[in-house]
Image: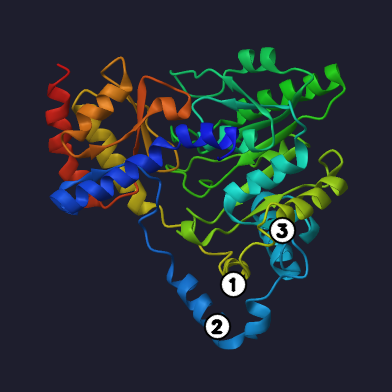
Amino acid sequence: MISKKMENMVANSSAIRAMFEEGNRLAQKYGAENVFDFSLGNPNVPAPESVKKAIIDLLDEEDPIVLHGYTNSNAGYEDVRSAVAQSLNERFGTAFEGRNITMTVGAAGGLNVILKALLNPGDEVIVFAPYFGEYRSYTDNYDGVLVEISPDTETFQPKLDEFEAKITPKTKAVIVNTPNNPTGVVYSEETIRKLAAVMEAKQKEYGTDIYLISDEPYRELAYDGVEVPYLTKYYDNTVVGYSYSKSLSLPGERIGYLVIPDEAADSENLIAAANVATRILGFVNAPTLQQKVVKACLNEKTDISFYNRNRETLYNGLKELGFECIKPEGAFYLFVKSPAEDEKQFCAAAKKYNILIVPGSSFGCPGYVRIAYCVSYETIVNSLPKFAELAKEYK
């Protein structure tokens, strides 16, 4: 018999992944060109040529025993961590050193590492709806309690009054994700300053440390010159989780990092705990080849023109058909208001036209659906007549 905890997790397994698998089934039945799968945030822009070159050069030139062996530290290669720190300092005016960086198995691995390092059973982790649904699983992994802040469906910026009211002496961490999955919204600098002020005040009130965990896989995907604030500059107890899955189109390679600044409370012990957590969670160390690859590609610029064209075409097309949605400032998702009260019913109706979208309840925000536009431009264009047929059902 499997554990009770896993019974619940299996029963509530990700609707996103299930929809993706359904897309594969429909593609085999109707042909991939006739299925419009907007379910999974899987980048479809190839990795930059520099990534391929770095891999070939490393395989040709590096000692394979070293390249494919364990790293000296569970936190990763020292030269890679120092290079990441220097790159961040140049970009954001920070003062990190290699010791502040822990290389991780993607952002998901990084979040599990930092939550393992921080949480005692019963500690609370606050999230702002809509949010990436796996945050609940990650928190539950370490017997934490997830606390949701309800969504502001006008702006999808955090509701700070409710946030302030829900912080308790058991609050250990707050997770933010900007640019946001599933809305594409970027939290404004004003929002970040106010959020930080609330957290500072609550720390003083309760005499506790509350950590702000900034989940940043979409940092490089911001449109129209929108600035994405770097959160360690606004709140000392900030930990940043980053992934190269989206910026370098390497989701399957599972490579990212944590930033644990010296300014964070108990930083020396927290860095040590993250190092140990990397080992005891079974990651051991981030993939060694990919650590070297990202070091070689730190200055690579993300070409967002492909995603931006998809964004403009899909957003404008759906608005013309009468759908309601906020224009995303980043990431590669549209969060569309369901014309049916039950958005799961709307998702089922869309499937009749081979359109696969994800219900907002998967993100703690029922009444909406997420459309991932990291697909071919042809898929966007060819889907619009099908969306038009779908829209007619609700007029």
The image position of residue 384, as x and y in percent, is: 17, 38
**Secondary structure found at label 2:** helix
Q: Which image quarter is the N terminus in? A: top right
**Secondary structure found at label 1:** helix
Residue 91 visible somewhere in the drawing: yes
Residue 12 visible somewhere in the drawing: no
**Secondary structure found at label 3:** helix
User: Is 319 above or below relative to 258?
Assistant: above
Q: How is the image coloured?
A: rainbow
Q: Is residue 59 left or right of residue 376?
A: right
Alpha carbon distance from label 1 to label 2: 9 Å
Q: Which mark is residue 379?
A: none
Circle 3 residue: 85
Task: Give the residue type at disc 1.
Answer: Leu
The residue lying at 64 percent from left, 44 percent from top is: 111
Task: Give the residue type at disc 3.
Answer: Ala
The residue lying at 71 percent from left, 61 percent from top is: 86
The residue lying at 80 percent from left, 49 percent from top is: 273
Q: Earlier in the sequence, mark 1 or mark 2?
A: 2
Q: Nearer the viewer, mark 3 or mark 1?
A: 1
Q: Which mark is residue 289?
A: 1
Looking at the picture, tell me which residue is in the foreground, 224 or 352.
352
The total of numbered circles placed on residues is 3
The image position of residue 71, as x and y in percent, is: 72, 70
Looking at the picture, tell me which residue is in the foreground, 331 or 243.
243
Circle 2 residue: 59
The image position of residue 204, as x and y in percent, is: 85, 21
